[in-house]
Image: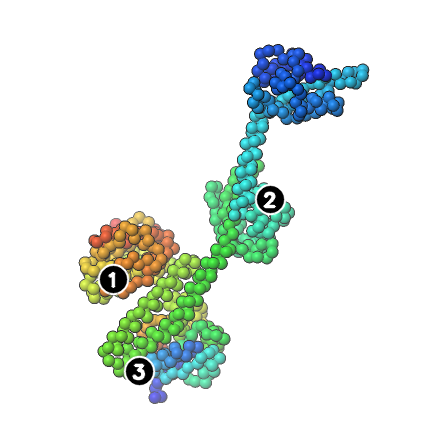
Amino acid sequence: MENKKVILVVDDELDFLKMIRMRLEANDYMVITAINGTEALEKVRDYKLDAVLLDVLMPGLNGLEVLKKIRQVNKDIPVFIITAFSSEDRFELAQKFAASGFIVKTSDLKKEVDNITSFLRMSGKYKS
Amino acid sequence: MIFSSIQDGICVLDADMRIMLVNPAMERWYGHSMPLVGKKCYEAYHMRSSACKICPVLKTFRTGEADHEVVPRMGPGGEVAGWLDLYSFPVKDPASHKIIGAIEYVRDITERKAVEGELGMAAFRLATVMENIDEGITLRREDGRFIIYNSKMGDITGYTMQEANSEKDFISLICPDQAERSKMVTAMVDAATERGVVSEKEVTIRAKNGAVKTLLVSTSLMQHREGRMLLSVFRDISALKHMSQLKDDFISMVSHELRTPLSIVKEGVSLILDRIPGEINFEQENVLNSARRNIERLTRIIDNLLDISRIESGRIGIKKKPVDISELARQVAVSFGNKARERSIRLEMEFPAEPVMAEVDPDMVAEVVTNIVDNALKFTDEGYVRVGLKRYQGGVELYVEDSGIGISKEDMPKLFGKFQQFNRARESTEKGTGLGLSIAKGIVDMHGGSIYVESDPGSGTKVTVTIPVNIKNLERDDAYGK
């Protein structure tokens, strides 16, 4: 239980949160969710997180603004941008804020979660 | 002597309008063999029995002043044979100052009248076109002064020709934005420096009432004896731009809005198929697999719709970089290996052994190859699909050949149209979106290349794409060739 990695998923679509939570938990992650930017920032402060999955299009604070603020508090935490599209200019923008990768909503989420797992495994190895 | 050699007609009349003296020029015009002297002028010149009402001589007799009129020159049959500029001067008795006669001085202006008539007609035609055309037209001298500025131009900018000419810098007035102004100026400089070249630019202007308008401006250089001039045609495409923007925004919005629910449905089905919420039986799995296939199809349709909308609106940026285009195309072809095996079709490849470097957008080129190979497999039931690449002087040629059902002559012209399915899709394969080839064409066009299709219904199709390639990038390969 203590060994489980903790992932914060930020998305305003409750049904999407439900699905991705199920997928991540099946991959042995502990999942915390937030439905807007403000809640996400609180949880970034309150929890010791291993990664954040962050939706770009949200009412109120949008994903990139949240990412900017996360970086002010925590420079190292891996943040993956959730987007509806596979090719967008905002990718370049996200790169500016040091996003670790992207999750394309319409692609195969099983593969996307596998990619996150390999990423965290790799970065974990580097740290140790 | 002078009297008889003068080229204009001169005639001296007495107070009864009887001809007393006439010079040879006047006699020639009227072609009279009989002597004119002694006859009344209206009898001799107009074959009338009384004086003509418009005759200036009559006025001179009445007022004692010189007079002038343009009168018809009558031919022998009474027809109008030409036009005369007729001056009449009074002849007065030196003692009594009474009018005793008149001198008619006549110049033949038939030719001048004809030229004037033609010029008038030409000017009328030009003015009619200029004032009724739905485009602003200006002719501008190098000092910035407008010589032509039609009323549509006035409608577009809100400024009259006088206002435009009284401005020191009219271009800056209608183009307050620096970037837009430089586009307009560039168009003019291009036209001025390269003779015969029509330079076309899309420029945004601000009209007098503050309205922002998008214009298509084409400018060309005119040489005139008074100096060089710029002829510009301004087409107001604001409404068109607005419509096209609305369409793009709509497609973009719809695609965004459709994607999220679609992704949730897809993931829901996938979670069940992956047995994450619990076990399912064979029939349930079967049903869900069909559902997932169709969700994927819907996703493809939305992706394609968005792609075509971006290509058409020019919103998609082409990101060129040097890549081995041969390897790129080969990898795409290889990715169809499973699909070809499943359908028992031979996937043949003809790629050069050495790399072929080309500066292209790799993602876009991959999409072109994907769409064409996907089509070839879809419409081939047995035999082969051959994918290959060849170099030619100045570019590369990519081809996809198949032994499939081919395309009928009637369908050929519609091939690159949107949503074309030609009723040839079959049950055994997944249905397409009808957008693949138009996306491919859009991408090839963006690379300055061309795409063409040859087909023999019943025995196969060959799609060829040519992309011009920077020769510099190919130099290395030339060495391989030698």
- Amino acid carrying mark 2 in the image: Arg
Q: Is residue B416 above or below residue B95?
A: below
Q: Quadrant of residue A118?
A: bottom left
Residue that numbered label 1 is attached to: B426
Residue that numbered label 3 is attached to: B277
Mark nearer the viewer, 2 or 1 = 1
Q: Is residue B249 above or below residue A42?
A: above
- Amino acid carrying mark 3 in the image: Pro
Determine whether the residue tagged by mark 3 lies in a helix, strand or loop.
loop
Residue placed at 29% from the left, 70% from the top?
B293
* Label 3 neighbour load within 10 Å: few <14, some 14-19, many 20+: few
Mark 3–mark 1 distance (CA, rounded to whole Å): 36 Å
Q: Quadrant of the N terminus of chain A?
A: bottom left
Q: Are marks 2 and 3 in contact (CB under 8 Å)?
A: no
Q: Quadrant of residue A56?
A: bottom left
Residue nearest the observer in this picture, A53 or B424: B424
User: Mark 2 — on which chain does it sit?
Assistant: B
The picture places residue B168, in percent across and down from the top left corner, at: 63, 48
